[in-house]
Amino acid sequence: MRPVSALAALTLCLAAAGANAQGVRTERNVSLELANQIAAATVASCTAAGYAVTATVVDRAGGIRAVQRADNAGPHTLAASFDKAYTSASARNNTLAMMEGAQKNPAAANPVHIPGFLLLGGGVPIKVGNETIGAVGVGGAPGGHLDEQCAVAALNTVKDALK
């Protein structure tokens, strides 16, 4: 009986190891180098338009990867840019679109009750195909639509890296 019990135990161990291997996921994420490029390009785009902003880039889980704050950007722009990036990465959507949806449908405004969510324009997801690998948030331009324009312009400068 002992050899059968040992064989049964070995079979169970191998089955459990196989089950664990199926549970491992491979995910793409924004690298530090890419995050720095996006943050710098975002600030440069807004600076060229005459806006002093802060750009924050977060990874797919909403963790900060890079922050750049232009000269003369207000102190509030640090928190606003992070909250926009976090919201965009979490929802995998542009925060301007989310804000507009909430204005048309009050029930869509409920995420504002989640700590860290900010439904103002300026948060844009960083995507590879349909997969969100991070987000960029911008704060400081005189309107969220302008913050978003700077973010989109920056993402266009790195579009070859997002293939």
Image (tube, rainbow, N blue to C red):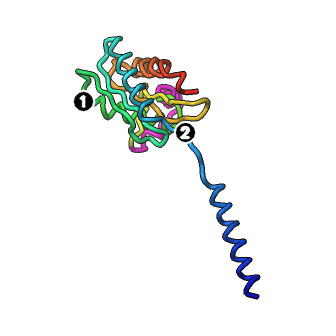
| Residue ranking furthest to the front | 3
Q: Is residue 80 located in the magenta-colored stretch of the structure?
A: no
User: With 52 as the anchor, is 3 left or right in this view?
Assistant: right
Q: Choose top left, top right, bottom left or bottom right for residue 151.
A: top left
In the image, residue 132 sits, relative to residue 48, either above or below, namely below
Q: Disc 2 residue type? A: Arg
The N terminus - image quarter:
bottom right
Mark 1–mark 2 CB contact (< 8 Å): no
For the magenta stretch, what is the residue range? 96-115
Query: Residue drawn 41% across and 42% down?
Result: 63
Instruction: Indicate the position of residue 129 as horizontal and vertical percent values.
Output: 61, 29
Q: Residues within 10 Å of mark 1 (few under 14, many from 20)?
A: few
Q: Earlier in the sequence, mark 1 or mark 2?
A: 2
Q: Residue furthest bottom?
A: 1
Q: Is residue 143 above or below residue 91?
A: above
Instruction: Nearest to the eye among marks 1 and 2: give it.
Output: 2
| Circle 2 SS class | loop
Identify residue for label 2: 28
SS for callout 1: loop
**Is residue 119 placed above or below 144 in the rendered structure?**
below
Q: Position of residue 9 (x, y in %)?
A: 69, 76
Image spot of residue 54 (x, y percent): 32, 26
Q: Which residue is mark 1?
A: 75
Q: Is 58 on the left or on the right of 19, as rendered? A: left
Image point (42%, 25%), residue name: 38
Q: In terms of depth relative to the viewer, which is nearer, 43 or 117?
A: 43
